[in-house]
Each structure stands twice: as structure tokens, then as C-alpha cells.
Image (cartoon, rainbow, N blue to C red):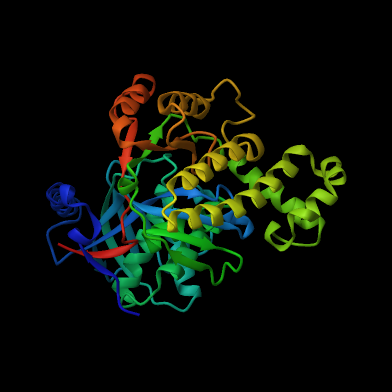
Amino acid sequence: MKPIISTLKDIYPDSQLAAQKQRYEKAVQSFREYFGNDGEVRFFSAPGRTEICGNHTDHNCGKVFAASVNLDIIAVAQPTDDDRITIKSEGFPEDSISINELEVVEAEKNTSASLIRGVAAKFRQEGHRIGGFRCYTTSDVMKGSGLSSSAAFEVLVGTVLSHMYNEGQISPVKIAQISQYAENVYFGKPSGLMDQMASSVGGFIAIDFKDTTSPIIESVPADFEKFGHALCIVDAKGDHADLTHEYASIPTEMKSIAEYFGCKHLREIAKADIMLNINLLRNKFGDRAVLRAIHFYDENERVGKLVHALKAGNFEDFLGSVKESGDSSYKYLQNIYANSDVTHQCLSIALNVAENSLHRKGACRVHGGGFAGTIQAFVPLDDLQQFKMNIEKVFGAGSCHVLSVRPVGGTEVVL
């Protein structure tokens, strides 16, 4: 395959080109100040992602519709011969791992170092070449925003290894699978594959994870502005700390239902199996597990409806599916607030403010994993200024982010 190498113009909107060039130049300066002035450097970028439909379906081999966004992590990088990967991220301590010590380190879980070690380990397991490098990174993917900063970081590390040591020949799908492995096994979070796939592949993509070793990916070009709407992400200022158990409970409960039927994932059985045995399943696994399984099947079907509407240019039906996704996430998936902390319900407040601001127009829903963080809204352009004002009255200046979809996933960059 041809290595994916992009220019700034390929990645960013024209209105951002000057600012992005300055951003990269500043990152070079920071690299030189931290690592020294010797040698040529190379540039890499991996985007955040937005999930549009398919909330918590990927970990049970479901369907999703997602897109990469114009917020990204960039790296200034340089190969080394010391068998170490050293990454200094702006605002964070240095992470450094030896590529000769790639076993899981229990004390390292939930850290960036674990992600670096996990990506390098899986590269080697898959028979790909690895080597040392040092890099300086800076990110405008808001941490805890539901835009998947961790997936972007994993994809960035994989993209650097692909281009520096494998001539850019590792496919975006393979980099995404390697990244998910790092997050699951080394970091310790049982995520699905959607976040990494959207960041690595880029653009609007519909993904069917029925076979996670060979997912079906379809590019679905779309321009929300042509439909008179902006895509917004609202930062509700929630704290993701100590919520891993809440996220983990969703795939655990869904898979417990599947295991009753002798399967690993809900995708292997039908919704009819659930409904025919609903009382038995309620008694054995509890109502929430059953409701979450029902959400999976309905959300899977909804992805197909939403993609069909978008292809046909039927934006009202598209918005209807977005609303249905949010409604199902609230009532059945139940990932809007943590049951362990019912006094803090920032996403519920954000959804209420958004719905009142939209006046039955547009659409809004939970964004990302849920429980804290962000909501997503499709806002009519004529109402955008007032919508932002209403949101920022509650959550503060800069809490409403207007995003654009970027056509390129993880990539090497030439300035």
C-alpha cells in the first residue's frame, strides 16, 4: 500500500492553515529545547473522533457511524538508536520505555507509558519492525471530551512506527487494531474498536465490526453545512476519574447476556432470543443488563437507517436517528450519569439546556462513552450563536466547540 503522507492543506480547513503552521513550528522549537538541536525531524498527526451513532455497540461486534475531526495530536519525531521510545507531551511528564522490555507492567496501567509499550509490543508480535524514537507532542483533543484523546495518542504512536520503521506500509485498520490491543491489555480499559478505527482511517465512516479481524468500512461523504447545520461538542465539565468501572459494566453486562446463549458477543444472537427469554434473563442478570442488550440491537439497526438517510440527502431522517440514539442511550443504555454518584449529572443538564435552545430543531445526544464529559449537538446555522451563548452561560466560555470533519486519519505530515 502507498504510505499515507499529507500536507497541512490536506488535513486542516483553509481558515486554520496559518495557525496550524505556527503550531507545528512552535512544536519544533519545543522539541529542540527539550531534546537538543541535532538532526532532521519528521511530523505526524492523529485526529480525535466523534461518534455519530452506534453508542457502545463496537465491543459487541456491532455497527457504528463515526468521523475524524479537526482537533488532533501532532508529533515532532526523530529516530534513535538507543532502543527507547521517549515521548514528551506538552504539559505532561516524559514517558520512556525500552523496546526490549515489552511485557505488561501492572503498575503502569492507566498511564500513557502503558499505551506506548502496548503498541510497540503488538507491532513486534505481528512481525512488524520497531525501533527507538523520541518525539514531542502537543494536542488540542480535549482530554475526557469523548473525542478519544487516548485513541489518537495510540494511533499517533502506531503511525510513527509504521513510517519510521515499516516504510508506512502498516494499514490504518491494522494500526487501529494494534491500538485497541494496547488499550485493552496494557492500559486496562475494555474499549471497543470504534475510537481507534475512526482516528486511524479518517473521514466519515460506517463500520461493521461483525468480524473484528476484518471490519467492513464504508466511506460516507457528507457536509453538514450544506444541510444548514453545525456539528457541536459541548464540554459539560464532568470528571472521568474513577469511572472506569462504569464503562466496563456496559460490555460486561451485554456479554453476560450473550454468554447465557453460549456466545461471546450479542452480535452472535438475535434480539428475538432476548425477547423470548426476557423474564428469565431479568431474573438471572437484572433489568439493566437486559435493557442494555435491547439498546444494542436497536442501535445497530439505527446506524443503517442513519447512513441510508445521509446518503439519500434526507437530513430530517438523519436527525431523527440521532435523536433516537440519544433517547435510547438515556433510557436503556443508561450511560448519562453514574449510578454511584447521582448528585452529579452534568450531561443531563447539558442535554436539557441543548434541547431548550434547539426548540425542537436539530438534534442532541450523549457523546462518547458517557457518564461525564460531553454531549453532541447538530445546530441550525441560524441558531448557532444563540445556542453557544446559552451553553456557555451554564458551562463557561469555550465549552461549546464547533467541529469540522477531517478527511485524513493518522498520517505523516509534510510542511
Q: Position of residue 5 (x, y in %)?
A: 25, 69
Q: Please tell me in which quadrant of the rendered image residue 339 appears.
A: top right
Who is closer to the viewer here, 61 or 323? 323
Residue 60 in view in this figure: yes
Give the residue drawn at x 49%, y 50%.
108
Left/right of residue 40 with respect to residue 374 in the rendered view: left
Q: Is residue 159 above or below residue 237?
A: below
Give the residue drawn at x 53%, y 45%.
321
Residue 97 in view in this figure: no
Q: Which quarter of the image is occupied by the N terminus?
A: bottom left
Q: Position of residue 122 (x, y in %)?
A: 49, 68
Q: Position of residue 338 (x, y in %)?
A: 60, 31
Q: Is residue 157 above or below residue 231?
A: below
Left/right of residue 286 with respect to residue 155 in the rendered view: right
Q: Position of residue 50 (x, y in %)?
A: 42, 48
Give the residue drawn at x 15%, y 46%.
19
Give the residue drawn at x 37%, y 25%.
391
Q: Is residue 280 above or below residue 129?
A: above
